[in-house]
Image: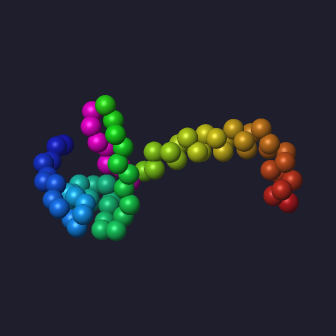
């Protein structure tokens, strides 16, 4: 699906609107935070933090490596 929108001035910045069907499809609402990610194809707008997967991988490695210490700390 492709939708065209226009960039408009908002104070000293610029912004665009997201059509209602897309907001509903991705469960987004006014006030929600989104992330802008530069890709080779252009700009990706996503509600998901692109660093979250990396942070979870680091956590999983630490939890695995120090599982006995984590178990003791949980007591």
Residue sitting nearer the eye, 21 or 29: 29
- Report the span colored magenta: 41-47
Residue at (74% x, 39% y) in the render: 64
The answer to which image quadrant residue 44 occupies is top left
5 vs 61: above or below: below
Relative to residue 45, is residue 28 depicted above or below?
below
Q: Work out which residue is located at the far front of the displayed protein and give it.
A: 12
Query: What's the residue at 22%, 58% (across, down)?
Result: 14
Asked if residue 3 lies left or right of residue 63, the reply is: left
Task: Using the image as rendered, state which of residue 64 and residue 8 is in the foreground.
Answer: 8
Number of disc labels? 0
Q: Position of residue 13 (x, y in %)?
A: 25, 60
Q: Residue at x 58, y 45 (%)?
A: 55
Looking at the picture, how far across and down is residue 48, in whole percent?
Answer: 42, 50
Q: Quadrant of the C terminus?
A: bottom right
Q: Is residue 17 left or right of residue 72?
A: left
Give how far across and how far down residue 56 sits, in percent. Answer: 59, 45
Q: Is residue 72 left or right of residue 4?
A: right
Residue 19 appears in the rendering: no
Work out whether residue 26 can be spotted. yes
Residue 48 is covered by the magenta coloring: no
What colour-coding does the image apply?
rainbow
Residue drawn at the location 33% of the way across and 59% of the way down: 27
Check the picture and name the quadrant holding the N terminus: top left
Looking at the magenta stretch, what is its main secondary structure? strand
Q: Is 43 colored magenta in this rendering?
A: yes
């Amino acid at each position: 699906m492709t939708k065209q929108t226009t960039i408009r001035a908002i104070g000293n910045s610029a912004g665009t609107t997201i059509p209602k069907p897309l907001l509903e499809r991705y469960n987004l609402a006014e006030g929600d935070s989104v992330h802008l990610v530069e890709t080779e194809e252009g700009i990706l707008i996503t509600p998901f933090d692109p660093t979250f997967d990396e942070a979870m991988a680091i956590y999983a490695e630490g939890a695995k490596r120090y599982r006995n210490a984590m178990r003791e700390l949980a007591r």
